Amino acid sequence: MEARNISSVRELRLQHEVYRQKEDKPDFRALYEDEIKKTGLLFSKHAAMRMSERKVELTSELAGNLKTAVEKARDKGAKDVAVIGSSSAFIVNVTNNTVVTTLNAQEMRNNIFTNIDSAVLL
């Protein structure tokens, strides 16, 4: 009986490994480099993953608006800013020029933003 269980465990591990290799995960490096090109901002690994998971698309228009919002916040002395648009929000560490996380429209509802000193509405 134990031999069968060991064999079953091995089969499950093999199936899991095959599944992991087939799973359609976005390539983090490619996603990260695309976002930097669009905005000039850095995106933390967490932010890039959240964008992918939450299906937040960074169009060239949104990228330009985000960059402008961060520049305005920087000019006003902001350190951590919530950039809030109609369909997404970005929490940005202005000092490091880094997007820390991203929310989609559904997640923005009934949500509280903490550890920010400024907000910019797009």
Image: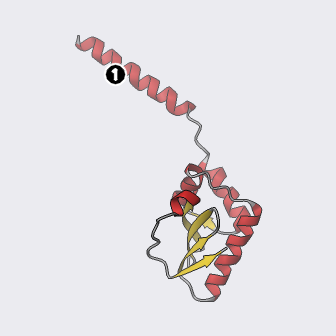
Residue 21's place in the image compared with 121, above or below, is above
Q: Please tell me which residue lies in front, 110 or 72.
A: 110
* Residue receiving disc 1: 9
Give neighbour class at mark 1: few <14, some 14-19, many 20+ (Cα, 10 Å): few
Residue 17 location (% of width, % of height): 47, 29
Left/right of residue 86 with respect to residue 21 in the rendered view: right
- Most extreme residue toward the right, as rendered? 60
Residue 121 location (% of width, % of height): 63, 76
> In the rendered structure, which amino acid carries the disc numbered 1?
Val
Q: Please tell me which residue lies in front, 86 or 48.
A: 86
Residue 57's place in the image compared with 71, above or below, is above
Residue 49's place in the image compared with 110, above or below, is above
Q: Quadrant of residue 66?
A: bottom right
- Most extreme residue toward the left, as rendered? 1
Residue drawn at the location 50% of the way across and 33% of the way down:
20
Residue 23 location (% of width, % of height): 55, 34
Q: Quadrant of residue 65?
A: bottom right
Q: Please tell me which residue lies in front, 11 or 54.
A: 54
Q: How many marks?
A: 1
Describe the element under mark 1 as helix, strand or loop. helix
Left/right of residue 47 with respect to residue 41 in the rendered view: left
- Quarter of the picture containing the C terminus is bottom right
Residue 16's place in the image compared with 91, above or below, is above
Residue drawn at the location 50% of the way across and 82% of the way down:
117
Residue drawn at the location 57% of the way across and 31% of the way down:
22
Residue 77 location (% of width, % of height): 58, 88
- Most extreme residue toward the front, as rendered? 110
- Quarter of the picture containing the N terminus is top left
